[in-house]
């Protein structure tokens, strides 16, 4: 089975070694003024001038869609699991396009190639579960872990940030104007928590790839805001749920036994049946 092979592959040390190596081998792209010497500036400039900055006027509409999504999940749960898989995959594709591509005078058409590849990986493994149908989406239960996850998710979806200067702002209105529904870093904690609420009845490949990308993006943001721009420490706090939930889910995913490869004899018996 393909699922068994993917599960086994994502448990191998060489898979993670290759994944780490990709971080240093895939440069950003720019239609002009490209130089390996300003790799970091190209990434920063592209992210800060991405298409997501141009659609802030529709942020409230995205939040209404997010509320509808949450209500449907809580009301219908696993009855709409395929729809949930599709919506999550499509949302990650949206994040990929609007957060990692920009058109500016400085670099022309530019994109953060690595992020695009990583986001695409996440979208594909959620689409993949349409075939496997291993993900389940049970509502949270009144237990400590689930309560902690709920609080972390509420924090990220709220995005309590005042932007100029960057500082905490717990105004309820921020839920609608800060556009968490359009941000990978704010939505992935929700998607991972939805799987953790149903663990172990989840697609381990989907979970493991999602947390791997979440860890990667999370650690970049933590380093950026806590080390390189410490005056924006509150943005570092905003990304802690992404990193910590991803880290917890990553180790959690290895607690289940490795999927056993199908033997030829087993396949033959199944065919005879």
Image: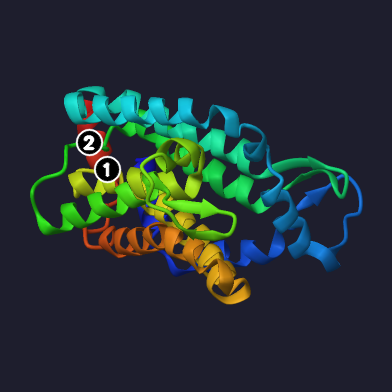
Label 2: how many Cα within 10 Å (few below 14, some 14–19, many 20+):
many
Residue topped by disc 1: 194
Residue 115 against residue 66 in the figure, above or below:
below
Query: Can the viewer see residue 82?
Result: yes
Side (left or right) of 155 relative to 95: left
Q: Earlier in the sequence, mark 2 or mark 1?
A: 2
The quarter of the picture where the C terminus appears is top left
Query: Can the viewer see residue 273?
Result: no
Residue topped by disc 2: 137
Q: Nearer the viewer, residue 178 or 138?
A: 178
Q: Are marks 2 and 1 in contact (CB under 8 Å)?
A: yes
**Secondary element type, mark 1:** helix
Measure the alpha-carbon separation of dots 2 and 1.
6 Å
The quarter of the picture where the N terminus appears is top left
Measuring from the top left, give residue 180's x and y in whole percent: 46, 41
Q: Nearer the viewer, residue 208 or 234?
A: 234
Measuring from the top left, give residue 113's x and y in whole percent: 69, 49
Q: Nearer the viewer, residue 82 or 1?
A: 82
What residue sits 85% from the left and 48% below the top? 107
Circle on res. 53: none
What residue sits 10% from the left and 45% below the top? 141
Label 1: how many Cα within 10 Å (few below 14, some 14–19, many 20+):
many
What residue sits 82% from the left and 65% below the top? 38
**Secondary element type, mark 2:** loop
Task: Give the farthest residue toward the right.
Answer: 33
Measuring from the top left, give residue 91's x and y in whole percent: 48, 33
Q: Nearer the viewer, residue 130 or 239?
A: 239
Measuring from the top left, give residue 43's x and y in whole percent: 72, 56
């Amino acid at each position: 089975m393909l699922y068994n092979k993917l599960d086994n592959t994502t448990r191998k040390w060489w898979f993670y070694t290759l994944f780490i190596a990709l971080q240093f081998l895939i440069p950003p792209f720019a239609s002009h003024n490209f130089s390996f010497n300003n790799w970091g500036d190209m990434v920063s400039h592209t992210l800060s001038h991405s298409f997501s900055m141009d659609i802030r006027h529709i942020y409230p509409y995205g939040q209404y869609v997010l509320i509808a999504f949450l209500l449907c999940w809580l009301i219908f749960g696993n009855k709409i699991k395929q729809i949930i898989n599709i919506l999550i995959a499509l949302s990650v594709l949206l994040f990929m396009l609007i957060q990692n591509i920009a058109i500016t005078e400085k670099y022309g058409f530019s994109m953060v190639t690595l992020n695009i590849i990583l986001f695409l990986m996440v979208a594909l493994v959620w689409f993949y579960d349409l075939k496997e149908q291993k993900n389940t989406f049970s509502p949270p239960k009144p237990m400590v872990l689930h309560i902690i996850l709920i609080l972390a998710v509420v924090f990220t979806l709220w995005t309590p940030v005042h932007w100029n200067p960057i500082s905490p702002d717990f105004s309820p209105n921020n839920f609608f104007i800060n556009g968490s529904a359009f941000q990978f870093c704010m939505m992935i904690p929700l998607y991972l928590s939805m799987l953790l609420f149903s663990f172990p009845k989840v697609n381990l490949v989907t979970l493991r790839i999602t947390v791997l990308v979440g860890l990667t993006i999370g650690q970049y943001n933590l380093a950026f805001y806590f080390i390189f721009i410490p005056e924006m420490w509150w943005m570092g706090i905003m990304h802690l749920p992404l990193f910590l939930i991803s880290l917890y889910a990553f180790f959690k995913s290895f607690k289940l036994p490795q999927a056993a490869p199908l033997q030829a004899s087993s396949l033959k018996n199944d065919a005879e049946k």
